Image (tube, helix red, strand yellow):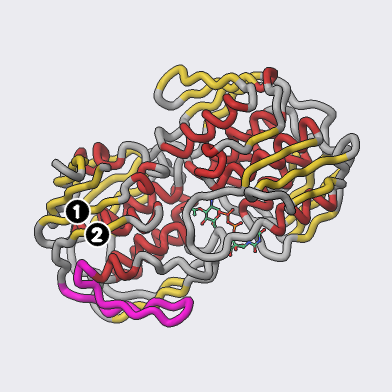
């Protein structure tokens, strides 16, 4: 068991480069098997979720080869199984994309129900509704939380209205519809950058998807997709996490290799709080040279403020001058980390979906646990600002989604090391 040890209150300075987007990578890797071809995927982040998905694809018969730290070749011609029920499948939430990919290519899929971060009820009813409307029969009655999907022949196009603008359902239906017969229309689709990225990837494989990034996506199904080469977009949430690290430490950092437009909601909030933000074509510089002031945040689907930055911004608001209110609109229970955050001396009260944060003038080091991936990032942010030494355990959650985080932070001047828990 490893943990991070952080000695706080070092002002971060310098340049940090953002890796490929986790939530695009975990969709694009399974999506590759909808094609009967070889895909080369570049700019993959070096994270545990990618490793787990490669293991799963290998079990299905696809040959996965990393040619360097960020380039993966997937030979999907060799896929010879539609059964993804191994333990590695349950490890990550995005395994649900195997349903769309296998169903689209072979008309059959057997997939273990997903695991991943746990913050309340995480239904997949909208994914299943979409597959049903495209002709799939779905059996969820078996033991061991395995979903079996089957279509007689080939999936057909359908008009699918999503009751919630779900990222996962939008992507899963898009993958399945890429090779369905006829036209599929997804209404009330989610618009996150990784949805556009997955659509661009599928189009590069020969799919015909239009409207990704708007709330109506139209897909004309193709008989067959081929291989190709694709580069994943930078990670919006990783970029936002570093911007907040710069802001909380009174630092001056340049976060490079990002798409500034994806950061608009966070940039606006950091400016409201008093940070200076300078935008270039592919970088954002954050200068934080005075105490920041409180602000209010409501999480929303893109282009609203991302729920995946909610724990991190809450850590920042904890030391802002005044009272802030955060409203979590996407997940019903994404405040499980608050008890851990309080150990740093944070003053926060949870009222249902709201967190009311009374800014304090400083935090003190604490021994805390990461309760999920973004909660882990929030613990790091608080520890960077806190006086003295902090430790964060359960960092396997953080490794699931942040590439080389301690190296990147050390490079910016943070005093952080990964230590074995018993050392
Ligand atoms: N929902 C339903 N029915 C469904 C699907 C979703 O009711 O069939 C509800 C959920 O309960 C939730 C809301 O819709 O309240 C949004 O869920 P969504 O499907 O958009 O989430 P997801 O696809 O499971 C992805 C990211 C999450 C991120 C959310 C929201 C991946 C692998 N995960 O999850 O990322 O929080 O979108 O943006 O893409 C993370 O990276 O830390 C993370 C948790």
Q: Is residue 92 above or below residue 84?
A: below
Mark 2: few, some, or many residues within 10 Å (few <14, many ≥20)? many
Q: Which residues are magenta?
A: 343-361
Q: Does 43 sit left or right of 180 as displayed?
A: left
For the N terminus, the image quarter is: top left
Rounded to the nearest angstrom, the CA distance separating label 2 from label 1 is 6 Å
Q: Which quadrant holds residue 207?
A: top right
Ligand 1 lies under 8 Å from the Cβ of mark 1: no
x and y percent of residue 204 in the render?
Answer: 67, 29
- Whether residues under marks 2 and 1 lie with C-beta atoms below 8 angstroms apart, the answer is yes
Could one spot residue 248 in this view of the protein? no
Instruction: Farthest residue to the left: give it.
Output: 388
Mark 2 residue element: strand
Q: Is residue 95 above or below residue 304?
A: above
Question: Of residues 203 and 101, which is closer to you in this image?
Answer: 101
Instruction: Name the mark on residue 391.
Output: 1
Question: Of residues 105 and 202, which is closer to you in this image?
Answer: 105
Ligand 1's image quarter is bottom right
x and y percent of residue 299 in the render?
Answer: 49, 67
For the C terminus, the image quarter is: top left
Say which label, 2 or 1, has the lower sequence index.
2
Q: Is residue 349 magenta?
A: yes
Instruction: Name the mark on residue 368.
Output: 2
Residue positioned 40% across, 33% down in the render: 46
Q: Which quadrant holds residue 313?
A: bottom left
Instruction: Name the mark on residue 321.
Output: none
Residue positioned 37% across, 58% down in the render: 371
Mark 1 residue element: strand
x and y percent of residue 270 in the render?
Answer: 34, 63
């Amino acid at each position: 068991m490893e943990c991070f040890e952080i000695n706080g209150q070092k002002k971060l300075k310098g340049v940090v480069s953002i890796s490929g987007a986790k939530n695009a990578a975990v969709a694009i890797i399974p999506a590759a098997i909808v094609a009967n071809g070889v895909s080369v995927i570049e700019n993959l982040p070096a994270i545990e979720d990618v490793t787990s998905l490669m293991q799963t694809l290998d079990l299905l018969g696809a040959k996965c080869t990393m040619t360097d730290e960020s380039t993966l070749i997937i030979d999907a011609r060799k896929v010879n199984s539609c059964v993804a029920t191994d333990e590695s499948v349950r490890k990550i939430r995005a395994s649900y994309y195997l349903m769309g990919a296998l169903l689209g290519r072979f008309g059959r899929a057997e997939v273990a129900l997903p695991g991943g971060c746990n913050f309340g009820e995480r239904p997949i009813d909208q994914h299943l509704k979409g597959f049903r409307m495209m002709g799939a029969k779905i059996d969820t009655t078996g033991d061991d939380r395995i979903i079996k999907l089957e279509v007689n022949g080939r999936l057909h196009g359908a008009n699918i209205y999503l009751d919630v603008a779900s990222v996962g359902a939008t992507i899963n239906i898009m993958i399945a519809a890429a090779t369905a017969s006829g036209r599929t229309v997804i209404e009330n689709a989610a618009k996150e950058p990784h949805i556009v990225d997955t659509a661009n990837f599928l189009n590069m494989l020969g799919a015909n998807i239009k409207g990704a990034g708007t709330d109506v996506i139209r897909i004309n199904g193709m008989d067959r997709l081929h291989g190709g080469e694709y580069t994943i977009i930078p990670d919006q949430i990783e970029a936002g996490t570093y911007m907040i690290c710069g802001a909380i430490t009174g630092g001056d950092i340049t976060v490079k290799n990002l798409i500034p437009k994806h950061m608009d909601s966070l940039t606006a909030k950091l400016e409201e709080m008093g940070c200076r933000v300078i935008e270039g074509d592919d970088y954002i510089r954050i200068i934080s040279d005075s105490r920041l002031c409180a602000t209010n945040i409501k999480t929303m689907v893109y282009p609203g403020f991302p729920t995946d930055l909610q724990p991190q911004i809450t850590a920042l608001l904890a030391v802002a001058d005044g009272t802030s209110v955060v409203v979590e609109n996407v997940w019903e229970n994404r405040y499980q980390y608050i008890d851990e955050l309080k150990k740093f001396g944070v003053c926060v009260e949870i009222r249902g979906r709201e967190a009311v944060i009374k800014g304090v003038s400083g935090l003190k080091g604490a021994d805390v646990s990461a309760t999920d991936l973004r909660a882990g990032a929030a613990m790091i942010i608080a520890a960077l600002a806190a006086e003295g030494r902090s430790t964060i355990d359960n960092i396997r959650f953080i490794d699931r989604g942040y590439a080389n985080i301690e190296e990147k932070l050390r490079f910016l001047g943070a005093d952080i090391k990964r230590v074995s828990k018993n050392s």
